[in-house]
Image (cartoon, rainbow, N blue to C red):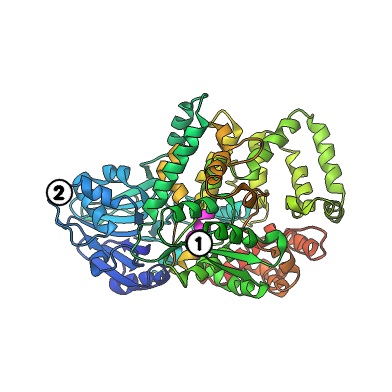
Amino acid sequence: MCGLTGFIWNSDSKISHVARSLDLMTDAINHRGPDSEGSWINEKDCISFGHKRLSVLDLTSAGSQPMFSNSKRYIIVFNGEIYNHNTLRDLLNKEIVWNGHSDTETLLACFEHWGVDKTLENLVGMYAIALYDSVEKALYLVRDRMGEKPLYYGWNNSVFLFGSELKAIKSFPGFKGVVDRSALSLYLKYDYVPAPFSIYKGIKKLPQGSYIKIKMNSGRWDSKQILDPIEYWSLRDVALSGQSNVSKKSNEHRLIDKLDDVLSKSIEQQMISDVPLGVFLSGGVDSSLVASLMQKNSMDKIQTYTVGFNERSYNEAEYAKKVALHLGTEHTELYISPEQAINVIPKLPLIYDEPFADSSQIPTFLVSEMAKKHVTVAISGDGGDELFGGYNRYTMACKIWKYVEKTPFFVRKALSKGITSVSPRIWESLGSSIPQRLNITHPGDKAYKFADILLASEIGDVYNRLVSHWENSCDIVIGCNNINKPIYESHFTNDEHNMMFLDSVTYLPDDILTKVDRASMASSLETRAPFLSHKVVEFAWNLPLDIKIRDSKGKWIVRKVLDKYVPNKLIDRPKMGFGIPIDSWLRGPLKDWAESLLDESRLKSEGFFHPEPIRKIWAEHLSEQRNWHHHLWSILMFQAWLEQQVDIS
């Protein structure tokens, strides 16, 4: 795992110190690779690469970057891991003389012998790549199939900048960051800035499974080139093809064994490392299965890590400990105090580079920080929910719509109005009678959310309302051009698969994987996600829905595989999120901090938000009239980010 950056320019561009500019950009991502660094500048072709290395495979200088191919035609900077690189070496020309055993060297040999497209077709791994072809005079920027590794790019005046994180681009001397107010509106809606947007105008995120290519023409880089990403792997095509070939007479036992096998192979590949590795264990289905298969493949005790909270409704650590005891792992847990979590908050704008409001970013950073004390690589269960139907919203949305669509709209409207006429406090008091084992938090919020869903026009609208926070976010952002078009598209014969697909191309790469990448890399920890091997992804999309969701419970097949290794009684409980009690903290230890950021005169002078609706929900939250912590957290994370910026307009 590493960090990459660089830029291209033209000879008449006003860059007085190319080397110094590259050093500033590279130093900005030192946390992604503190073990070594490298740079390359070709003043004739006006291109430069910078690299920070976290040594995981081939710890010698033979794995250092930037790296040239044997013929010197290609030069690369690369962030990620190619899990099948030893297999690729076997497929290549037997006469190749290898300098070391790094996957970077393997990549270059593949590009040299097969070209870009065939190489990408054969890779198994996670990666962001910057590759320069000195013969074709072309720069390629590549991102992995599922979007595990980040890559930003864009023109800033006459210079084309790229990097693993925005902070590298922002470090280029003279960079002018202008907030994209439409992207800001999307951020308020989803708690993250969705690809291809970034928070800055003119800077984009490269979408998953694609690359861009920029060619020098007549000795110049053309800033007017339209940089349309070229898709080399399409999840949509994989999913549609898989679902079109689903057999209605599937042998369940054979499918369970097949998932066990394909996931075991993915984990076995991802356990290849020249440094210590462990696993994030929450005690849920996905992480418990990953830990089980890792322990099965290891002669020694694997190392597992979890964080816990003293607030019972947020705590999964006790379940993780029981799973760890059953598997016999070397288990480490950290119970997070409010003080520890709050101390992380000032770091968040620096860690995430652009506004990001998934509050589980805090425990994710803390568990990464803890794990880094023992290992350099941590494996997670990310991706299991999106692939195998694990989120409650998949079944909830369909159940709700089944009844709602049969009800005349005027009746739904009246019912919605009736629900919201009752104080959230009363709904909370009524919710106190709900058994604790069901883990239903904030029943008042859920009642109001249901009231909102009653107004939906179709199932896609139900989904959009479930995944949205500031639903009319463009009304909050001053100067917003509304691009909040519905993201729901119907590709499949059932709505559960439509939702799973959409989450896999939006929420998964832009929220979950962004959260884990930035939180772990801030501690110089590499994370890997075996569920996201494209072999596992392709297998999942060849399954019928009832193998994934059965009796209103998701991940049926994953649970059946896990039954081989962990007793069901240790796992079978309502799904919990990886959240923290932000709601109560905003009324307590975070109150003064939040009040400063939400000050009405401050909001007016900054000019990004209309203050009135924000001040209204802040007052309602403080008085416990409503629980608005999701909406407030997104505003606060933008405000905290903005506070650390300069030259922003």
* Precedes in sequence: disc 1 or disc 2: 2
Residue lying at 76% horizontally and 69% vertically, measured from the top left = 587
Q: Secondary structure at mark 1?
A: loop
Amino acid type at image mark 2: Lys
**110 w.r.t. 63: above or below:** above
As drawn, the residue found furthest toward the left would be: 95
Q: Can residue 278 be seen at all in this image of the molecule?
A: yes
Amino acid type at image mark 1: Thr
Whole-angstrom CA distance, mark 1 to mark 2, is: 41 Å
In the shown orientation, is residue 77 left or right of residue 351? left
* Quarter of the rendering containing residue 535: top left
Residue lying at 61% horizontally and 45% vertically, measured from the top left = 391
Where residue 237 appears, as percent x and y from the top left, is 43, 34
**486 w.r.t. 222: above or below:** above
Magenta extent: 511-519
Q: Nearer the viewer, residue 231 or 219?
A: 231
Q: Dot 2 corresponds to which residue?
A: 94
- Residue 30's mark? none
Residue lying at 37% horizontally and 60% vertically, measured from the top left = 162
Q: Main secondary structure of the magenta part?
A: helix
Q: Dot 1 corresponds to which residue?
A: 329
Where residue 532 appears, as percent x and y from the top left, is 45, 48
Badges 1 and 2: C-beta atoms under 8 Å apart?
Answer: no
